[in-house]
Image (cartoon, rainbow, N blue to C red):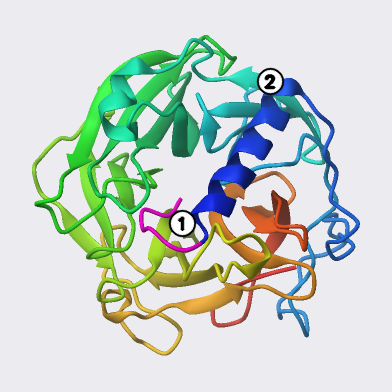
Amino acid sequence: MSGFMDGGLGRRLLCAGVAAAALVAGTTLAVRADAATPQPTVAVSTPTAPPAGYPNPGRVSGATATHDPSMVKTPAGGYLVAQTGDNIPLTTSTDRTVFRAAGAVFPNGAPWTASYTGGSRSLWAPDVSYHNGRYYLYYSASTFGSNHSAIFLATSATGASGSWTNEGLVIESTGGDNFNAIDPNLFVDALGRWWLTFGSFWSGIKQVALNPSTGKRSDPTIRALAGRNGGAIEAPFLFRHGSYYYLWVSFDLCCRGADSTYRIMVGRSTSPTGPFVDRNGTAMTAGGGTQVLAGHGGIHGPGHQAVLADSDAEVLVYHYYADSGASYLGINLIGYDPAGWPFVY
């Protein structure tokens, strides 16, 4: 979710409002005919080289209007998706293909966020995961163009609409800070340490350590993971594959409908705290990043990605814009080349 004001604000608000309303109302919104024809995500075998061009999103149907999606696999084997919108809309799926609207995290609103949102009910970029028998949801409250922002935590035993407990503020930023507290992502490393990665524009992507017992900050240190000297970078997602930790981010601009230039980038490190470098060895703190997916054909501005380790493959989840300017759910599978760099198929 962008924390920077741009000329597409009006369209962003319109698209987000339509998507959120459709999700909450349960409207069936399959991929539009003015987007490129989607392809199935069923894989016969995992490739070791990227396709010649970027693949289209895999076939999905139902409640697929979305922005900033985050997906978790449930203990029962289904899928729960949280996304940007009024009171954080939820969708569910039994097969990662057909999605159904499932209410909102806070159906009665979240008044504790009002001082950051200016009274708006729209909450941004939720990150949902499952640990120790509970769902954890980190989410952002802000307004466009401002870094008077906050990240909050909610937990639930079931993930169902209305079952979530507000656990309070995790971190905030103000006009006096050089970072923006939006776009959170929780990562639990191999040693059981909890990390919250977040950030947008300003000085870039940051990380703080969390206490696993509370889900809140455990020390005051704020680490710098990536940046573009104030340029467009956001939506961090940390994921481990093999011996590397991969930091996925979105470069450039979302929220301009079919004119969006979002693209999905990645760097890696042998430590969850970095330093992260791209394929060429350029540090992500110096603007580095290896491109994994960008706009093509009728797929515009793919970004705000999340990665899910599923039983059949690792899965990239993101939103993209159709020619109409509406935003939809994108899903592709992830492969790795011989050098260990990810690609989508």
**Of 306 and 342, which appears nearest the observer?**
306
Q: CA distance from mark 2 to mark 1?
A: 30 Å
N-terminal of the two: label 2 or label 1? Answer: 2
Q: Which residue is mark 2?
A: 102
Residue 241 image offset from top left, x and y in percent: 51, 60
Residue at position x 45%, y 26% in the image: 121
Q: Would residue 192 appear left or right of 222 to someone viewing this image?
A: right
Task: Quadrant for residue 259, please give it.
Answer: bottom right
Q: Nearer the viewer, mark 2 or mark 1?
A: 2
Residue 143 image offset from top left, x and y in percent: 35, 42
Magenta stretch, main secondary structure class = loop
Residue 32's place in the image compared with 165, above or below, is below
Q: Is residue 78 visible?
A: no
Q: Which residue is mark 1?
A: 240
**Of 276 and 303, which appears nearest the observer?**
303
Q: Would residue 271 appear left or right of 88 to someone viewing this image?
A: left
Residue 331's place in the image compared with 65, above or below, is below
Residue at position x 45%, y 15% in the image: 109
Residue at position x 50%, y 24% in the image: 87
Residue 39's place in the image compared with 84, above or below, is below
Residue at position x 75%, y 59% in the image: 322
Which element carries disc 2, helix, strand or loop? strand
Residue 195 image offset from top left, x and y in percent: 29, 45
Inspect the image, locate mark 2, and give the three-letter code of the amino acid beneath it.
Answer: Ala
Which element carries disc 1, helix, strand or loop? strand
Inspect the image, locate mark 1, and give the three-letter code of the amino acid beneath it.
Answer: Arg
At label 2, counting other C-alpha atoms closer than 10 Å, the crowd grade (few under 14, some 14-19, many 20 or more) is many
Task: Quadrant for residue 34, please give it.
Answer: bottom right
At label 1, counting other C-alpha atoms closer than 10 Å, the crowd grade (few under 14, some 14-19, many 20 or more) is many
Please give the range of residues in magenta: 1-7
Task: Quadrant for residue 38, please give it.
Answer: bottom right
Residue 193's place in the image compared with 251, above or below, is above
